Amino acid sequence: MRLGPRGERSNRPNREDTGDVKPNPCRMSDPRSRREFIVDAGRLALGAALAGPLTALTQATPPTKVDWNQLARNLDGTLLMPGSPAYTEATLIRNLRYAKNLPAAVASVKTARDVATSIRFARDHGVPLVTRSGGHSFAGYSTGPGLVIDLNGMTRVTVDPTTGRMRCVGAATNEDVAVAGQPHGRAVAGGQCPTVGIPGFTLGGGLGFYMRQHGLAIDALVETEMVTADGKVVTANRAEHPELFWACRGGGGGNFGINTSFTFQTFVVPAHVTIFSLTWKGDACARAFLAFQELLQEAPDGLGAVAHFAVDAQETGSPTPTLRVFGQVASMSAERTERMFARVEARAKPIERLFRSETFWAAKEWLAEDTGPPNAFAERSRYFPRPLGRSGAEAIVDALSRAPVRTGNGLSVETPFFAWGGAVNRVDPTATAFYHRRDLWLQAVSASWSLEADPEDVQRLREWQDTFYQRMARYGSDRAYQNFVDPRLKDPLRAYYAGNLARLRRIKRAYDPGNVFTFAQSIR
């Protein structure tokens, strides 16, 4: 069996056991040096030079070899071309569905000036532009045929011990933030995966195990530095460019410019937390989920959890639904946490259970998702503003029991429910660009497959995913998480931004009137 949160056995088989592969939001195409940016800015179809008025791409002059060489000389960083030693690693992406979409060049930038220089080059020559940290865009928006701006070369994290403010530059990751914050006993409400980058994670909102107590990542954001469409390096906060600052707190990556740094107000970590994990199989999953849902609505804000449904095909060769509820409770003993969960265990006895007190940093390590080999995957998501009833919980279990997952066929499914509430819900939906402030759950519907899987099996998997997603519509909303990019959404902008879309469009027109920063699901 593969490892789930570090140090704990998952209830899901790994590829070596069954041929199945798990769609893991933090899994990288190459674990050597990936720094993520969950939604990596997107492809930018660019116009004319930054210094002058916007013109059409068709009026630009395609770059020659001499032009590319001049760009290389103008950068403090490095321009990587096909055939150069570092090009292969710099173009690796997590979702192998888009791995063949290779760029003409990668600008490994060192400064915000390099970012502006790269944008100017792309606009002068009509070269599509993409910003990335580690290729983490679920829909492949972190690669393209033109110029890729790679922020890894300018990454650093610093903490001011006097104010508790943390500045994350370039493609800083959750792991970088933890390393910088631990000596000071400070943290940011980061995500579950160590290799996910702070930029895209933050721009889309930023969820994690600490959000019910400390809010989303954007709720701790003090200011951000970015390069805008007119080539200016600006600082956006509540006093300077306040509308742009509002948009950066949930407006998604790649819409308004290229963010080169983020400054957060950290929180002081608790002396200890209690980690917990309970696992069920089969029909007991529905009863356990409903019982935990009742607990969640009464639980303290310090409870952070995921109700993780999946399929185990290891024992019988056919799909068996599983549910694993795991997470942490801040500043609560293991004994009190166990008593709090007694009502859940009384409704459905788990096959595995764990309650253990740990330091904040040990718990963070335990909660971190493991990484693994690359795969191809598709992700869908839905918010639930109200509790699911028995029919909704049973619909989940029934759908998983019908998943086209068999031993050795290289397919895998999972559907985690991220526990919302607490500090997230106490912020007005219009206070930031992140609208989803009144929900109880965020569901992801994930499907993954190996490249060796039978295409007909993959087709059945995608059909199952869409059917399940639509089946859950009657229980939830039509809104989706902007960091779980979903190309199959019929109206993605309204799904991602809902009641804040009109304001975001006004800000887009103000800061990017020529639609310089654009991609398949960009704000326009």
Image: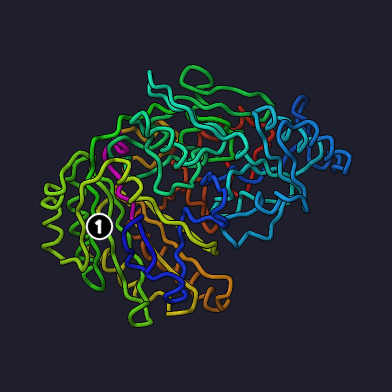
Q: Residue furthest bottom?
A: 316
Give the residue at x 60% y 54%.
93
47 sits to left or right of 376: right
Q: Which residue is mark 1?
A: 277
Where's residue 420, x and y in %? 30, 46
- Considering only vertical position in the picture, is 407 above or below 27? below
411 relative position to 127: left or right: left
Q: Identify whether 442 is placed above or below 321.
A: above
- From the top left corner, tell me how far across and down residue 256 is, in percent: 59, 34
Q: Which residues are magenta?
A: 417-426
User: In the rendered view, does 325 fall on the left or right side of 431?
Assistant: left
Write down the quadrant of residue 264 in the picture: top left
Q: Please say whether residue 176 is one of the residues in the magenta stretch.
A: no
Position above or below: 481 against 504: below
**Quarter occupied by residue 435:** top left
Query: Which quadrant is the C terminus positioned in?
Result: top right
- Amino acid identity at mark 1: Ser
Q: Residue at x 57, y 33 (%)?
A: 259
Residue at image position (43%, 55%) is 381
Judging depth in this view, the residue of 92 and 184 nearest the camera is: 184
Q: Position of residue 412 (x, y in %)?
A: 44, 70
